[in-house]
């Protein structure tokens, strides 16, 4: 979601910028609203044969967790470029069949889009080269194990967890996802 045209940046951080704007209320009074904005993120579902790749990861401050392959888009980098870069950095693999699956956003007060990609037929082209703040071990899991993994407390990607919960509990959606991933 875009910020209002009258929003002004009042603080620039290393990851988040803070914006404020004046908003007229229904009774005619005016109030200052505020939002934060950051670069978009990408999350990738890499596929090798009948397996899905996840990352068992450790980062300073965040500790140990399980999550998806992905990260933040660099400045002026398109989400698809970021997805390709993150896939190579974290797994050493590339995919010639990268498909945008979903896009989510937190909304107006936390302006942060996440692009979810399916990376079919991944092939190793080099050794992984994660960032200096990442220790990553790649997990190969089955489609059914994916639903179990995201339900664990240590799974970090909460939006993806919510998406899979809805898929799991909506008739026909789980089979539809399986076809999207493996056909």
Image (cartoon, rainbow, N blue to C red):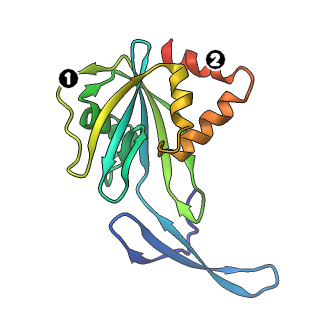
Whole-percent x and y of residue 87? 31, 33
Q: Residue at x 23, y 29 (%)?
A: 92
- Most extreme residue toward the right is 27
Q: Which SS class for mark 2?
A: helix
C-alpha gap between disc 1 and disc 2: 31 Å
Query: From the viewer's perspective, is 146 left or right of 51?
Result: right
**89 left or right, relative to 118:** left
From the top left corner, tell me how far across and down residue 154 is, in percent.
47, 44
* Residue at the farthest left position: 126
Disc 1 element: loop
Q: Can you identify the residue that label 1 sits on?
A: 125
Q: Picture quarter containing residue 2?
A: bottom right
Image height check: is 66 above or below 6? above
For the point 36% across and 71% down, the residue is: 13
Residue occupying the point 37% across, 63% down:
15
Label 1 Cα crowd, 10 Å radius (few <14 / some 14-19 / many 20+): few
Q: Is residue 159 above or below residue 91?
A: below
Looking at the picture, how far across and down is residue 110, in whole percent?
54, 62
Residue topped by disc 2: 175
In the image shown, does 180 or 66 lie closer to the viewer? 66
Q: Position of residue 147 (x, y in %)?
A: 56, 29
Q: Are marks 1 and 2 in contact (CB under 8 Å)?
A: no
* 126 sits to left or right of 109: left
Q: Name the N-terminal-most of marks 1 and 2.
A: 1
Q: Residue at x 46, y 73 (%)?
A: 18
């Amino acid at each position: 979601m875009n910020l209002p045209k009258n929003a002004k940046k009042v603080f620039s951080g290393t990851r988040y910028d803070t914006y404020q704007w004046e908003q007229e209320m229904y009774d005619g009074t005016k109030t200052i609203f505020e939002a934060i904005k950051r670069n978009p993120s990408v999350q990738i579902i890499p596929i090798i044969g009948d397996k899905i790749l996840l990352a068992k990861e450790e980062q300073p401050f965040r500790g140990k967790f399980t999550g998806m392959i992905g990260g933040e888009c660099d400045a002026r980098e398109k989400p698809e470029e970021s997805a390709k870069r993150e896939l190579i950095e974290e797994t050493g693999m590339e995919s010639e069949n990268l498909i945008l699956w979903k896009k989510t956003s937190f909304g107006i007060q936390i302006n942060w889009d996440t692009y979810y990609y399916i990376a079919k037929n991944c092939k190793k082209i080099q050794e992984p080269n994660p960032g200096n703040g990442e220790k990553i071990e790649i997990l190969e899991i089955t489609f059914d194990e994916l639903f179990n993994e995201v339900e664990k407390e240590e799974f970090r990607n909460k939006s993806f967890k919510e998406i899979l919960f809805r898929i799991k509990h909506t008739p026909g959606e789980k089979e539809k996802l399986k076809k999207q991933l493996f056909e």
